[in-house]
Amino acid sequence: MLPAEFYKENRRKLAEYMEDDSIYFVFSGEPKESTHDECYIFEPYRNFVYLTGQNCAHAMLLIVKKDGKVKETLYMHIPSERDQRWDNLIFDPEKIKAETGIDSIEDILNLENQLSRVLFDGRIQNAYMDMAHWKMSYPDSPDMRFAKKLQAAYPFMQVHNAYPFVCSLRTIKHPAEIEAHRKAVDITKEGVLNMMRNMKPGMTEYQIEAYYDFVLKYNGVKRPAFTTIAATGQNANHMHYVDNNTVTKDGDMILFDLGAQYNYYCADVSRTYPVNGKFTERQAQLYEVVLKGLKAAEEATKPGAVKDDLQKLSKQVMAEELVKIGKIEKPEEIDKYYMHGSGHNIGLDTHDVGDHGLILEPGLVFTLEPGLYFDDEEIGIRIEDTLVVTEDGCDVLSDSIPKEIADIEAVMKR
Ligand SMILES: [Mn+2]
């Protein structure tokens, strides 16, 4: 949990954005079944987390703005005796009030009755839902069901989507959010170091990954920010390889793309290391090309810089270096070896909300991740940092996860 003041401030900005005589609602979500009676780990809807800090299922935040006055209510599932006994669900309204700064905590079963009383005079004709909608065939959600119900009962009700507005708030991070990112990166670092100290040729990718997983679990991380990529040899040239079941060979490189999360704030880091702890001359040569591309972009990261320009800079530097070492003849031939963008916003989501082409501002947390993929040499290299834009440059949160060749070899020395 971040301080209650943080969530209060987020809600205050949202209420300011709302038209007078309107309501806003957002649900936390419902657990999803995986197989039979098993469920996936519940993932609360991130805008709900951003506004309340709570991670319970079957809850709804309602904000009513009427006559210029704002009333916030958190509707929650009140656990039955059975829920308490079997699932250890505890309902402690005083604790929730302290954590959220919301004074009114209600049973979600009272929602319709209470909302009817708010809407009875017909003055409220605008409702804001909050819905991420990244594809048309979106699975049915409690928000969609509730919006439909509202419009069926009050056909004059205009339903708007406040999602873009809440996402615009989420783009620039509060210092407490940056601290949570820092913590996620620190746990990630510990996990990477544990792999570096224990990996050796002959182990499978998943056996190496297990040393990372152990550290996450040990630090109370239930689930990483995203599925870990541990890709050796040619596997590294498939950007989303997650099978992680290949036996590593002496002389192979292994590419990791991974991140822990802390209070739902994500880390996203990539590193590429020689499995046996020592770069060959050729591996070092190609690795330095990518590292130079990353460093050029990091040095150019400051308020006012355009994020897309950082991507172009990385690419340009790597192209020049590839020409220098004779891998390509003309810079534009780099497209054969470089086929993705060089970074994304990161926050409560690994691929976080916010405009991709945006101009950097202090408090923006994002990643830079240049890579080169050489099918002809069975080598894939990606180096990715999580960084935050500061007043006069940037703070590379993952800087101390070894990326210089000398540092990598020193940690992995046996
Ligand atoms: Mn990544």
Image (cartoon, grey):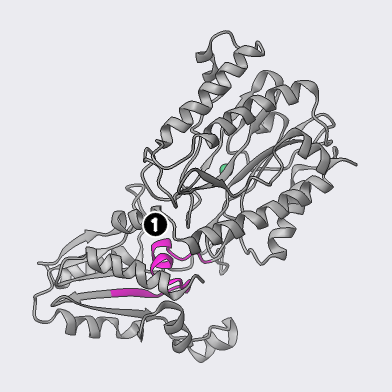
* Viewer can see residue 203: no
Quadrant of the image occupied by residue 65: bottom left
Residue 284, percent across and down? 74, 26
The C terminus - image quarter: top right
Q: Is residue 121 left or right of residue 95?
A: left
Q: Residue at x 58, y 67 (%)?
A: 38
Q: Give the magenta part as a residue range.
A: 42-62
Establish if 364 lies above or below 83. above
391 or 19: which is nearer to us? 391
Establish if 330 lies above or below 74. above
Q: What residue type is disc 1 on? A: Arg
The residue beneath circle 1 is 170
Instruction: Name the residue furthest bottom.
Output: 81
Establish if 387 lies above or below 73. above
Q: Is residue 288 left or right of residue 118?
A: right
Q: Is residue 207 left or right of residue 339?
A: right
Quadrant of the image occupied by residue 59: bottom left
Establish if 90 lies above or below 67. below
